[in-house]
Amino acid sequence: IKICLNRIYRMFMKYLLPILVAFCLFACQRYSDNWEKICDIENYIESRPDSALAVLEAIDVEKLSSDEERAKYALYMSMALDKNYIDVSEDSIASVAVNYYSRKGPMKYRARAYYYLGLAYYYQQDYDRAILEFTKAEKAAEVSDSLYLGMTKSIQGHSYYETHNLEEVLNCFHKAYDIYSALSEYSKACSVMYKLISTYIAKLEFEKAEEMLLDLLDN
């Protein structure tokens, strides 16, 4: 038995130990020193988007060491730019997030990645591609993120407006209004209601526009 144990020990030291050491080193190097800083951004990006943007801009992207790390950085950078009212027509940032979250990770991140890629195409005035990405965002948001579902339907409505598809505009804005109302996001719901009224006016459906305006004033 002692001989067998010695053989097992020697085999472990010769073959298995190097593999375990290599695995541990790989696990330790999976994320850079910026990982915790990037993850923490989700805790304040909604309330302090300017602080989030400042933190992200201070990070050296070249030092990010994994696909997941680069994807989360790209997603939060897309969010921070948007929440600081900086329109980004360059799609390369959001594409990094989409390339990762379209295959793995939480569905809410997939929804947001597609949303911001669609937003980039929207600012490029490539409305057909924007609508395609917003449709993907919608499918992911339906099961993960009601607020982004409302945001997606709203900007999707704007995209359809640019393609002169007023029926789809109304469909999107009505859904966005219902979602925002259910979430008690009243300022967003009110904004969408004004867009609905404007669309009915554009369709020369003045009675419907008046009906919605009176409903808005009553509430």
Image (cartoon, rainbow, N blue to C red):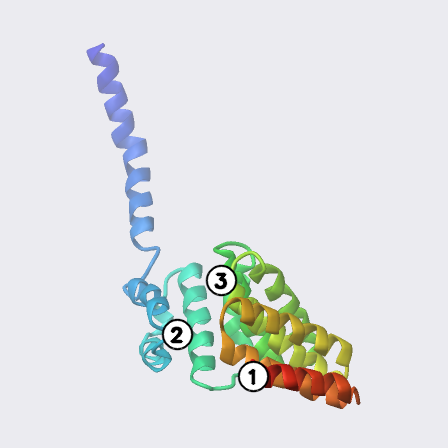
* Residue position marked by numbered label 1 in the rendering: 89
Closer to us: mark 3 or mark 2?
2
Q: Nearer the viewer, residue 104 or 199?
A: 199
Q: Seen in the image, is 172 located left or right of residue 23?
A: right
Q: Residue at x 29, y 26 (%)?
A: 11
Q: CA distance from mark 3 to mark 2?
A: 15 Å
Dot 3 or dot 2, earlier in sequence: 2
Q: Quadrant of residue 67?
A: bottom left
Q: Quadrant of the N terminus?
A: top left
In the rendered image, residue 149, in percent from the top left (x then y), is placed at: 57, 67
* Residue position marked by numbered label 3 in the rendering: 109
In the rendered image, residue 102, in percent from the top left (x then y), is placed at: 56, 59
Q: Seen in the image, is 134 located left or right of residue 145?
A: right
What kind of element bears circle 3?
helix
What kind of element bears circle 2?
loop
* Residue position marked by numbered label 2 in the rendering: 46
Q: Seen in the image, is 4 located left or right of residue 142?
A: left
Q: Residue at x 37, y 73 (%)?
A: 45
In the rendered image, residue 162, in percent from the top left (x then y), is placed at: 71, 85
Q: Nearer the viewer, residue 102 or 142?
A: 142
Category of crowding for the residue at label 3, using alpha-carbon neighbours closer than 10 angstroms: few (below 14), some (14–19), many (at least 20): many
Q: CA distance from mark 3 to mark 1?
A: 20 Å
Q: Nearer the viewer, residue 35 or 67?
A: 35
Mark 1: amino acid: Ser
Q: Residue furthest left?
A: 2
Mark 2: amino acid: Glu
Mark 3: amino acid: Tyr
Q: Is residue 100 visible?
A: no
Category of crowding for the residue at label 2, using alpha-carbon neighbours closer than 10 angstroms: few (below 14), some (14–19), many (at least 20): few
Q: CA distance from mark 1 to mark 2?
A: 22 Å
Q: Nearer the viewer, residue 206 or 170?
A: 206
